[in-house]
Amino acid sequence: MAWDTERTQKLLLDAATACFSESGLAGTRIDAIARAAGVNKERIYSYFGNKEALFETVLSRELETFVGQVHVSGVGAEAVGEYAGAFFDRFHQSPHLPRLLAWEGLERPAARMGGHTRLANCVAKVDTLSVALPGVSRPQVAQLLLSIIMLAAAWWTMPQMNRLVLGGSEGTQDDPETAADRFGRDRHRRAELVVQVTGAARALLAGD
């Protein structure tokens, strides 16, 4: 029977995504990825070269999907606020993505993963957001986009701060969190993010 290369690669990429998201690049072993995928580890080397190249492939795959799913709809502060909400929703669907980005920043900050394609995607995001904020300077738009990404991603990359800050304000930091609690906090955080980014965009449009 012919070897299903495409299926094997997908099994390895899915397993690597879970492992890298949980333990980072340095903390993940090739053996663990192969075991999770149910594939001989030699396939990793033959398909991807090494662990670093596999990490880059995993991140590039996730970002390629992400770029096509988050868009600005409309013009003005409210449209930008909902754009931030769309970032949050995308991370909510795939919480491993912000974690992969966090591990990249900690372990490979100068690696320039994704190269010119990734840079071009970021430039395009700034271009799109600039259309939604007419009259706002490009550097200000770029800073706002960075803030949106950071604010949305931090919900999944710094859960201890969510627990300490929000739990402290509610007096529940030591209480076990149920799935319903988490769902409610996720919804509330999204709503607050939209309000905060809408306010920031409105201030930029007003020239404050």
Image: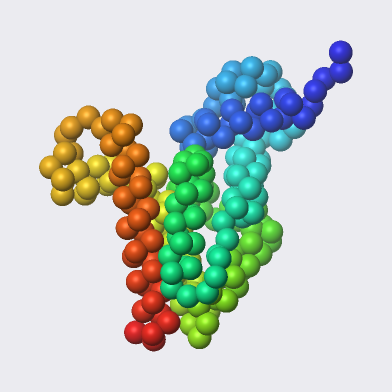
Left or right? Give the position of 208 relative to 91: left
Residue 158 position in % (x across, y down): 34, 45
Q: Residue furthest left?
A: 171
Left or right? Give the position of 130 relative to 140: right
> Would you place residue 38 above or below residue 186 in this image?
above
Of residues 81 and 10, which is closer to you in this image? 81
> Would you place residue 104 above or below residue 139 in this image?
above
Residue 60 position in % (x across, y down): 64, 47
Left or right? Give the position of 184 relative to 8: left
Residue at the image point whose x is 39% and y is 86% from the top: 207
Of residues 125 and 203, which is closer to you in this image? 203
Residue at the image point whose x is 55% and y is 70% from the top: 74
Of residues 65 and 50, which is closer to you in this image? 65
The way the protein has been coloured in the rendering is: rainbow
Residue at the image point whose x is 48% and y is 75% from the top: 76
Q: Quadrant of the C terminus?
A: bottom left
Q: Is residue 44 visible?
A: yes
Residue 206 position in % (x across, y down): 38, 85
> Would you place residue 185 above or below residue 22 in this image?
below
Residue 132 position in % (x across, y down): 53, 74
Q: Is residue 107 visible?
A: no
Which quadrant of the view contains residue 115? bottom right
Residue at the image point whose x is 59% and y is 18% from the top: 35
Q: Quadrant of the N terminus?
A: top right
Q: Residue furthest right?
A: 2
